[in-house]
Image (spheres, rainbow, N blue to C red):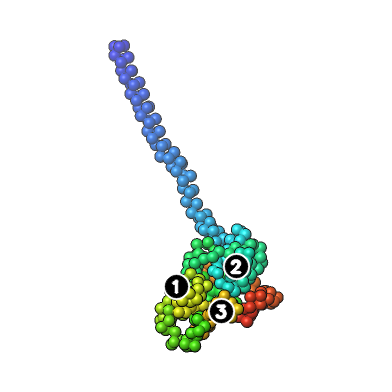
Amino acid sequence: MKRLMALMLAGVMTAAMVAGCGQKSAETTAETPEETTQEATPDASDTETPEADPETPEETTSSEESDLAYVQGKGTLVVGITDFEPMDYKDESGNWIGFDADMAAAFAKSLGVSVEFVEIDWDNKIMELDGKTIDCVWNGMTLTDEVKSAMECSNAYCNNAQIVIVPADKAEQYQDKESLKELTFAVEAGSAGEAQVTELGAEFTPVTTQANALMEVAAGSSDAAVIDSLMAAAMVGEGTGYANLTYTVQLNSEEYGVGFRKGSDLAAALNEFFVTAYTDGSMVATAETYGVQAAVIEQK
């Protein structure tokens, strides 16, 4: 009997132990979601991060919009040019001079930076600007609709025209637009001269610079060239390197401006500089050095 009671008691204790273990396991299992929820709670705070993120693009955009700050930060104004006397050309020491070059150097000084001149392919000027290999195009650039839509441009600072260059001994044959249509022209690619020859419907060969266009005519490779009147006054005719060439027909009237990246605040800074330089007489004095004072436009 005692043995039977002992066995029954042992069975009861075993059952109690099993029940106790089962309850503890259930309690542990029940706690697990709570712990998981608590661990996930910090993740929920991550949802606050996007609220802070929008401020970052605004700050970045603000700094990117200021071309002036960008140029002053790197300490150099990089000016895209071509060899174009009397606006941009090299002296005997290899330094860039000319009306545009001197004015660009003075503008850079007013910003507290140095100036660097980089020769560019004129046809790629917009790509050079947008790629930030240059900061502006300052090279007797005609303010065409295409230029003004692709760049942030300064106010006009010089008057100009596209004129036809031919050998002096043939000039009498080409005194109006109609007489020009059978000629073959050399023109700078992407220039206002190319646009005028295209409008004429004449045959032409694109070259890299206006100076090369003159060389084509002098060598007899092309019948004529179309270049800027300011360049023609400095490089064509008696007392120049092209004494055997002359200019005849004026194809249009136009104005020069300086081009910056679209939206650049450097254009407004340059306009202010132009007003100051015109008012104090330094702009006209610089123009007189290169014989272009009659083309300077009043700045106000």
Where 232 sits versus 172, above or below? above
Where residue 31 sits: x, y (%)?
42, 36
> Which image quarter: residue 107?
bottom right
Mark 3 or mark 1: name the one nearer the start of the chain.
1
Q: Amino acid at mark 2?
A: Lys
Instruction: Read off the residue under disc 1.
Output: 206
Give the residue drawn at x 37%, y 27%: 21
Where 140 sits versus 55, above or below? below
How far apart are the alpha carbons under marks 2 and 1? 23 Å
Please identify, in this view, whether the residue under mark 3 or under mark 1 is nearer the observer: 3
Mark 2 or mark 1: name the one nearer the start of the chain.
2
| Pointer 3 with pointer 1, Cβ within 8 A | no
At label 2, counting other C-alpha atoms closer than 10 Å, the crowd grade (few under 14, some 14-19, many 20 or more) is some
Q: Amino acid at mark 1?
A: Pro
Q: Amino acid at mark 3?
A: Ala
Say what secondary structure mark 3 lies in: loop
| Pointer 2 with pointer 3, Cβ within 8 A | no
Say what secondary structure mark 2 lies in: strand
45 or 133: nearer the viewer:
133
How far apart are the alpha carbons under marks 3 and 1? 23 Å
Give the residue drawn at x 63%, y 82%: 294
Instruction: Read off the residue under disc 2.
Output: 90
Give the residue drawn at x 31%, y 20%: 11
Instruction: Read off the residue under disc 3.
Output: 243
